[in-house]
Amino acid sequence: MNKKELSLPAGVFAASLTPLKNDLSIDFDRLISHCRWLLDNGCNGIVVMGTTGEANSFSVKERMEILDALIEAEIPAHKLLAGTGCCSIPDTIELTKHAVSHNVGGVLMLPPFYYKNMSDEGLHAYFKIIIQQINNPDLKIYLYHIPPVSGVPFSHSLIKKLTSDFPETVIGIKDSSGDWQNMKSLCENFPGFKVYAGTEKYLLDILNIGGAGCISATTNLSCRPASKIFNDPYGNEADSIQKKVNALRSIIEKYPMIPALKLVMAEVSGQVEWTNVRPPQTKLKKADSTKLMEDLKSIYFPDEFV
Amino acid sequence: MNKKELSLPAGVFAASLTPLKNDLSIDFDRLISHCRWLLDNGCNGIVVMGTTGEANSFSVKERMEILDALIEAEIPAHKLLAGTGCCSIPDTIELTKHAVSHNVGGVLMLPPFYYKNMSDEGLHAYFKIIIQQINNPDLKIYLYHIPPVSGVPFSHSLIKKLTSDFPETVIGIKDSSGDWQNMKSLCENFPGFKVYAGTEKYLLDILNIGGAGCISATTNLSCRPASKIFNDPYGNEADSIQKKVNALRSIIEKYPMIPALKLVMAEVSGQVEWTNVRPPQTKLKKADSTKLMEDLKSIYFPDEFV
């Protein structure tokens, strides 16, 4: 098996939603279908159990069952980036070992996110223990920088120390800060480090400066046009497609992201169970749902997207 | 068994530290000794697995083992307030059921703390599911309001709805906001609701307006003088003892709380393993340790405290 061919691809990733049954248990069948659809419609890879996937609303056991189900359904493991970062070292190790045993393309690791304002030294020690205890060359960590949610940013000095100390292991980042200057600076300051923008809004921009692609919530809906940008970034259509994709994201961003995306999935598929979310998430209200779908129709969604 | 006599006491609580061995596993023996010492030296009760106890740095299994060990060591269960709030419904239910099965005085429940800016409706739904699924009249929930760390505050409208809907279950709060006006307003607006200040700094103040007491990190060190305040709040000495206790807290607050407290425990006990912390926490540096102990000696610690 050629490891290199089976490493995580560059390109457009969706941070997959996690479909739930009415009793809020995981709807494995719908999840598998959705992941297949994403890969068939332009996604180069998928994040399972990221923020959009409501990862931290599931137990460690449930999170492992999700990955087991996808692998059993023959979703290509190397196209999966598995969210495995918890608050505690033992939970993060358990999830990460499990993901590595499935030969996933990589793991997406949040910093321990309960305590705030921890030192770089403390965060480095956390990752060091995890890497040393897992002790497996197949472990490929992508740092998950999402300070608006986690409350715990990765400083550039911490990234420098982690990539210096573990150059074969800490190999990329998902930057969901929303801050283009940070993404740009990561691409410039860490050559070879795989930087995925946390939004497709910056897909063309980040490809232009050597970034790896994007990993986004909204590419659950816009993976087809987004993939056209990735496949032909210097083509005549790239700019206009980027604008369309941005228009969709701008509409979704007016609403709470997870319930809004699930509402659209329900409307497009006719499967009302798609709207189920685990608290503290709440379903979109009726009026908001109507408004959202009207707004989307104004940009010819889904006709020009899916 | 008279349930009323065995309910959580009012008074001074320590949010217990969690002693660790050099391999960062739990030092059960030292934890048991520490809890016994706290109860023998003025603590009316103990929070196990709170923020100071590094709760979220342990797995669900480890957290249950800690409570099992304390119960087996015959630490009175009704004096224990067990931290059981996680990000996910299944984890929170598992820990809470386990704690209730041990007849603890109550559980201290964080809101689900990964997602920020969730609606009151979503947070209410989260607690409702937990309460309904546990479905046990022995469940007594104390809300854990600690926005500087959790990033997820409890609004008064949410507290009102929870206490209205579940008056026999949601019966108190630990307010670690540091905001006296919030504690005061909780005491005034929710008669009968047990409000514990998250710092002994406001012990006398909160007792004066009908609060239940305090639950604090620093009472790991100052439980003896703090208990004198609680036992005789209108006595001649209360004010002067409150000042001494505040002086200790002011010193500790200059340093990262958990490693500072553990350093002092190590110095006072001669047990150097007390300094162990789980990353992302880090041990206090040598210079800070020296300075901290010098500062404490200037207020006659430990002589006038323990």
Image (cartoon, coloured by chain):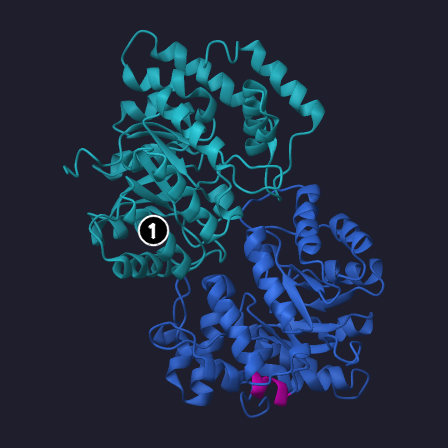
Chain colours: A blue, B cyan
| Residue plotted at (75% across, 75% down) | A7
- In the rendering, at what x and y percent does residue B124 appear? 32, 57
Q: Position of residue B32 (x, y in %)?
A: 43, 32
User: Considering only vertical position in the picture, is B54 above or below A98?
Assistant: above
Prevailing SS of the magenta stretch: helix
Residue drawn at 56 percent across, 53 percent down? A90
Observer-nearest of B214 and A233: B214
- Which of the pair B288/B17 is nearer the observer? B17
Q: How many marks?
A: 1
Nearer to the camera, B101 or A30: B101
Chain letter of the residue beneath label 1 in the structure image: B
Residue at x-position 49% and y-position 76%: A261
Residue furthest left as drawn: B2
Image quadrant holding the N terminus of chain B, namely top left
In the rendered structure, the answer to whether residue A264 lies left or right of residue B24 reads left
Name the quadrant of the C terminus of chain B. top left
Q: Residues within 10 Å of mark 1 (few under 14, many from 20)?
A: some
Membership of A37 in magenta stretch = yes
Whether residue A17 sits left or right of residue B238 in the image: it is right
Left or right of residue B284, residue B163 in this image = left
- Magenta region, residue range: A35-41
Question: Which of these two is toward me, B157 or A216?
Answer: A216
The residue shown at (47%, 88%) is A268
Disc 1 is placed on an element classified as helix
Q: Quadrant of residue A24?
A: bottom left
Taking B89 as reference, is A222 left or right?
Answer: right
Q: Which residue is mark 1?
A: B98
As shown in the figure, which amino acid type bears the numbered disc 1? His
